[in-house]
Amino acid sequence: MKPRDFLNFFKTRTGKIVTFGALFAAGLVIFGVIRKHQTPTDDVTAAPLGTNTVNGKPQVVQSVVRPMQAFHPPAAATTSPSAVTNGSAPQPLPVVPANQLPTLTPISLFADSSAGVVAPKKLSAVFAPFGRLIPCETVITVDSSSIQTPIIGLVTENIYHAGRLVIPAGTEVHGTAKTDHQRERIASGSSWTLVWQNGEELPIKAIALDREFANHTNQTGWAITDGSAGLRGEFIKSDNLAEIKLFAATFLSGAAGSLTEKKETIFGPINSPSLNNAPLAGAQDVLKIYAQQIADSIQKDGFYIRVPGGKQFYLYVLQTLDRADASLGGTAISVIQETDAPIKTTTSRP
């Protein structure tokens, strides 16, 4: 083998791998020889520290006793002017120890049962218990088409309890209305306000109940629906021909769809793209939209309930009525406590 061929062998991939293996093996051999000839380090023994020795000699503990004398501060003597005048000897003040600790109160392991307990409210002499039925009569018409209209009524009979007049006839009642389409009635909210003729106001929780008489001529007796929830009114349709219009639009839309020319395909019958089908397809789409608009109108505004003025109803109270809680203008100042103080005027002389 020529030297050039030998050098060219190491330039190939095989030659490079052989060279790397030879160098790696030589490195391992050198590392092993050096590790064998390395001498182990000597163990270092720690000598205990002599904490009680100084220069190898033990320490000697000595105590020195010196004569001490207790210090007694002289008592401060004060003389009063009367003692000096009378010529009597001054009396020393009592000495209070400087390091006297303050006396602490013992810790109580029992909580104060009276803390945080709110005293129950006392009722006045004029009150009415829970669940009173107050006969009322509407003043204005309540319409479900304009549900923002409030319910305004007047109390038609005096309400007594324990022989005392709690709510006189003629007291105003003010509430809010809610639509009740399922029962064809107008429901009420639970927040009401009683307004007396002298201006007193009392917010209460109550609901409106329907009042029906057995004999509507002289308004006597009680009908089967007397006391049912909500105010029964007159059922009124906004458009009497709405159902007929809906039927006609649906019928014409179906007729236009049946007259449309169709052709059979692998996916089923489809409309033929012809000039005769264009007006029929357009009429069918328009009639479908019109029928849907009529259906939405019937569902939303097709009918409404109207409760006329003068309708009799009950106001069922959901709390205890206390006449002392009434106040003027919704303020916290009671009418009994309010007095008209005369205005004082002063005039100055020239």
Image (cartoon, helix red, strand yellow):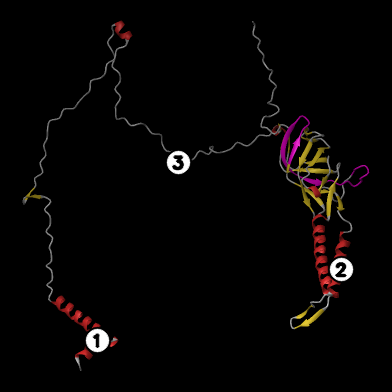
Q: Which residue is mark 1?
A: 10
Q: Which residue is mark 2?
A: 252
Q: Is residue 181 above or below residue 193?
A: below
N-term-proximal mark, 3 vs 1: 1
Q: Is residue 202 above or below residue 244?
A: above
Mark linked to residue 109: 3
Image spot of residue 149 (x, y percent): 78, 44
- Single out the residue that lies furthest toward the right: 217
Q: Which residues are magenta?
A: 192-220
Looking at the rendered image, the quarter that the N terminus falls into is bottom left
User: The residue under label 2 is which amino acid type?
Assistant: Leu
Gap in Å between the C-alphas at discs 3 and 1?
96 Å
User: The residue under label 1 is which amino acid type?
Assistant: Phe
Answer few, some or many: residues within 10 Å of disc 2's Cα (few below 14, many 20 plus, some between 14 and 19): some
The answer to which of 239 and 259 lies nearer the viewer is 259
Image spot of residue 337 (x, y percent): 68, 26
**Circle 3 or circle 1, nearest the eye:** 1
